Structure formats: structure tokens, C-alpha cells
Amino acid sequence: MKKVWIVGLFVSFIVAVGCKDEQDKLKEAMANAEAAKKQALEAAKVAEQAAKAAAEAADEASEEAGEDADDAADSAKDAPQNIQEAMAEMQKAIAKNTSNVEPVNFRDLKKMLPEKAAGIARSDAKGEKAGAMGMKISNAQGTYKDGDKRVQVKIVDMGTMKGFAAMAAAGWAMAEIDRESDDGYERTTKIDGHKAYEKWNSKTKRGEVKMILVDRFMVEVEGRNVKMEDLMSTAKGLPLDDLVEMKNEGVGEAK
């Protein structure tokens, strides 16, 4: 009987301890639930504020969009007239800076491309005639490749473009340039009396020589992994005198 009582007491102790652990866990769970509830309420409050702010921003954007749409509508009413005026001004500018000249046939320009450039045989030659809005030009281009060496020679007849327009097409022809650094140089100069431009970068081994002849023809020699003096000799070796003699070819014949 005594043993039964002791066993019962031990069991009661274990149950009591177990109940205490469960109570502690229950209290902890309730505390966590309360904290979660509080966080949820705070999150809901923040979300409500964000939604309100978003609604206000949307209203403001809608009002601004309405104003912009009204402005755009007003501008659209004047657009046809503005476009017509702009086109008229463009036509005047084109007429002022173009001449009645039929460009030299690009096939004739192709014949002027050298067989070799910087000692490299020509690998390709092409040409074309192009025109738009009353302007016509023609050009021929030769490509010279040998391993990592590459040279391009281009001859362009500016055709209908004249004076300021022809010079502006080159960009550099409208400026005086003289720059030099440890990596190379860039300058405008004259070659055989013609306005010219030279640029060389010893770091990248890239160079170019460009010239404008009689305000009509442009010749360009560009290369990489070749010497600058080779590019220069290639440019000087082009039939410059023949191009000068063609300055009046096609004048008054533009169609």
C-alpha cells in the first residue's frame, strides 16, 4: 500500500511538472500571439496610409495628365501648319546650299582607287550614287586587308552640295585644329594646296588623312596597324589633279 502511494505521488509530481511546462508554453504562445496581433495592426495602419498617399498621387497625376493632354491637343491643332512651315524652310535651306550638278558616275570614281594602299593589295571595291530631297552624291570605296592591317580609301563627289554645305559635311573643314599628346596628334593642314585633316594615335595604331578638293570632292584614307606616313603617301598618290579637272563635270545637268 505504501508503494502504491509513493508511485501515485511520483506520478502526480510528473503530471504537475508536465502541466507547469504546458502552462508556460501556453503563456508564451499567448504572448507571441498578442505581439503578432499588435504588429498586424501596425502593418495595416501603414498600408492604409500608403494606399491613401497613392490615391492622392494618382489624382494629382490624373489632373496633370489632363492639363498636358489639353496642351498637346492645342499643339496638335497647330502641328500641320508648323510642319508645312518647317518643310518650306528646309526646302529653302537645301536650295540655297545645293547646286545644279550631276555627280560623277561612281564607276569612274572606282577606277581612281589604287591597286595598293600602304603596300597592301586591294581586296574589295564598291561604289554608289545616293540622293534625297534634291541632294545627290556619289562615292567609291576601296578596302585593303592583310592580317591585322587594314586600310580604306574613299573618294566622294559631293555633287549638288556646295560651299558651306560641302564644308559642313566634313565637319573638320569648318575648324582650325592643332592638338598633340604622348599618344599622337590631330590637326588641320594643307596637302598640295588642298584643305586637309590628319589624325594619328600611336597607342591604337590608327590614323586618317582627309582632303577637300575644289569644294566638291573629298578623299579619305583611314587605316590601322599601318604607319602614318604610308597613309599620307597613299592620299598623296591618289589622282588629285584628275579630280580637280572634273570640278565642272555634270554642272547644270542635275535631273
Image: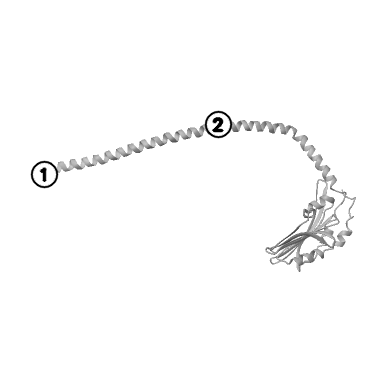
Secondary structure, mark 1, is helix
Instruction: Say which residue appears at 44% left-offset and 36% top-offset.
Output: 43
- Give the residue type that dot 1 points to: Lys
Task: Check residue 56 in the rendering and tell me which mark sits there, or answer none.
Answer: 2
139 horizontally vs 5: left or right = right
Quadrant that contains the N terminus = top left
When asked about the image quadrant of residue 89, the answer is: top right
Residue 248, position in %: x, y?
90, 55
Residue under the image location 82 percent in, 48 percent down: 135
Which of the colour schemes (rainbow, by chain, secondary structure, one colour) is used? Answer: one colour
- Label 2: which secondary element: helix
Asked whether residue 243 is in view, the answer is yes
**Relative to residue 148, is residue 2 drawn left or right?**
left
Q: Nearer the viewer, residue 144 or 182?
A: 182
- 1 or 2: tag closer to the N-terminus: 1
- Looking at the image, residue 196 sits to the left or right of residue 206; the answer is right
Q: Is residue 150 above or below residue 52?
A: below
Residue 85 picture location, percent across and down: 79, 37
Res 3 quadrant in image: top left
Q: Amino acid at mark 2?
A: Glu
Label 1: how many residues lie within 10 Å, few (<14), some (14-19) or many (20+)? few
Q: Which mark is residue 3?
A: 1
- Residue 224: quadrant of the picture: bottom right
Pick whichever, 171 or 23, lies toward us: 171
Q: Residue furthest left?
A: 1
**Spot occupied by residue 216 in the image (x, y as percentages of width and height):** 84, 55
